[in-house]
Amino acid sequence: MPSVLSIERISKRFGGVQALADVSLDFPLGEIHALLGENGAGKSTLMHVLSGLHRPDSGTIRVGGTSIGLASPLAARRVGIGMVHQHFMLIEPLTVAENLILCSPHRPRFRLPPQRAVRYAVELAARVGLDIGDPTAVVGTLPVGLRQRIEILKALAGDTRILILDEPTAVLTREETLQLFGLLRRLRDAGRLILFITHKLREVTEVADRVTVLRRGRVVTTRSVGNVSEGEMAELMIGTPAPQQRPRSALPADATELLRLDAVSTAADGGCRLQALSCAIRAGEIFGIAGVAGNGQQELFEVLVGLRAAVGGRILVAGEPLNHSTPAAAARAGIGHIPPDRHHDGLVLAMSVAENGVLNSRVLARLRRGMLLPRAAVHAFAAEIVRRYAVKTESLDISVASLSGGNQQRLIVGRQLAPEPRLLVAVNPTRGLDIAAAQAVYDALDAFVADGRAVLLISGDIDEVLDLSHRFAVLYEGRLTQPLTPPVAPEMVGRLMAGAPT
């Protein structure tokens, strides 16, 4: 089958980092093609080149046999290339319809009649076969799965023949992932080319026709999915046999209680109201909270780290009540956290790697000398995090935005573990990480609790909760089930996440 998209000897360098080196690939229409690789392997850079966000230093891109220059995302859209980014690019104060019509090649230049926007959104959703709910709903109020569908519709606006998705399932539940895969198959069968980046090997075997593995900016291999196993894909990604997760350590029978939630409730303020949550977490334990996004995970995180006040119940840390709902009070009580969104909550993207490496109140208190923060101390502290957690960076002084998502997450994990809190609240700690990086985080959490501390793991990834947790519960519509102890069938957990009775 002739190629609709060809790339020949594409190279791209950022400072001293060779992100892509002589990458050549051919893609036909009517294919789902997965891209695998470690964090920093060049996957997102390649897709950003194809979508017009980055200009290659050298090489040729051909669409339909014609050599083209993609100077901008608009230029890419004009030749039929659309991209869904890992971090959503929706305008949250606008409605669904307004977000969609802004991406239409036929949108009005000056005035945007609301009725026309709604009509366009409904027609586009019907044509693609996606349910978008109420087209007049404000995007900022929508659950993450629906936002993902709107991003896909945006990318398909106009005559899109090539759809690029960067980690499309990172924020989706299993059920939403299966729905997405059904859509991708329909688009493929209609003659489109689907390129998608993922770290989840099972997803490659489930939905892709072919897979390309990148390592250090170079193509390692392109294979038919039917001719390569998950184990082989993992080894091709990292260059060595995939790391094996350590067995879960046993929880001591006499372990002391580090955290108790006693009928904790929150106000109904537009989010999901926590309704009399109760549980106890012991020293040496990883306690998992599984649930679909929007069922109270964000509210629980905010209550525990002092960003939201509880209106009922008590929070006890090592037997002492947490009386003040402020981040400073939570930190003094020994509660640390890995935030749910590394860009919005975990990093200041305009600042350097070194500066972000010390953005923790307890770390800053340790390093400060009176009113001064010595640069040498900041660099030494950040350098130790980079070394210990294998953060790949050209320099401590470059912008943290230049790091891959996985390396940004490693930096956050190292920084938040450094003050040695008694309890760590970790929200989706391995979202977007490759196999080796995820295992490094798992090892860090295991070592953390082995030292007599505890982790509250809040995650939408069923496998992650089951693999890591000593015990877990499911959060649904602000209520928590009774604790369960693995092994538990993933299908049962999925039903609980959908609201089925225990």
Image (cartoon, rainbow, N blue to C red):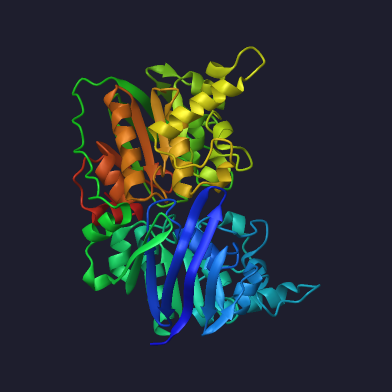
* Image x and y of residue 348, in percent: 60, 39
Residue ranking furthest to the bottom: 1
Tell me which residue sits at (21%, 52%) in the image. Answer: 489
Q: Quadrant of residue 219?
A: bottom left
- Residue closest to the eye, 258 or 369: 369
Residue ranking furthest to the top: 370
* Image x and y of residue 482, in percent: 29, 40
Asked whether, in this view, residue 460 is left or right of residue 367, the answer is: left
Residue 41 in view (yes/no): yes
Residue 96 sits above or below residue 26 on the image: above
* Image x and y of residue 71, in percent: 65, 69
* Image x and y of residue 251, in percent: 21, 28
Residue 267 in view (yes/no): no
Tell me which residue sits at (33%, 39%) in the image. Answer: 440
The quadrant the N terminus occupies is: bottom left
- Residue closest to the eye, 76 or 127: 76
- Residue closest to the eye, 46 or 318: 46
Residue ranking furthest to the right: 110
Asked whether, in this view, residue 36 is left or right of residue 358, the answer is: left
Residue 380 sits above or below residue 46 on the image: above
* Count of numbered labels shown in the rendering: 0
Q: Quadrant of residue 172?
A: bottom left
Asked whether, in this view, residue 387 is left or right of residue 249, the answer is: right
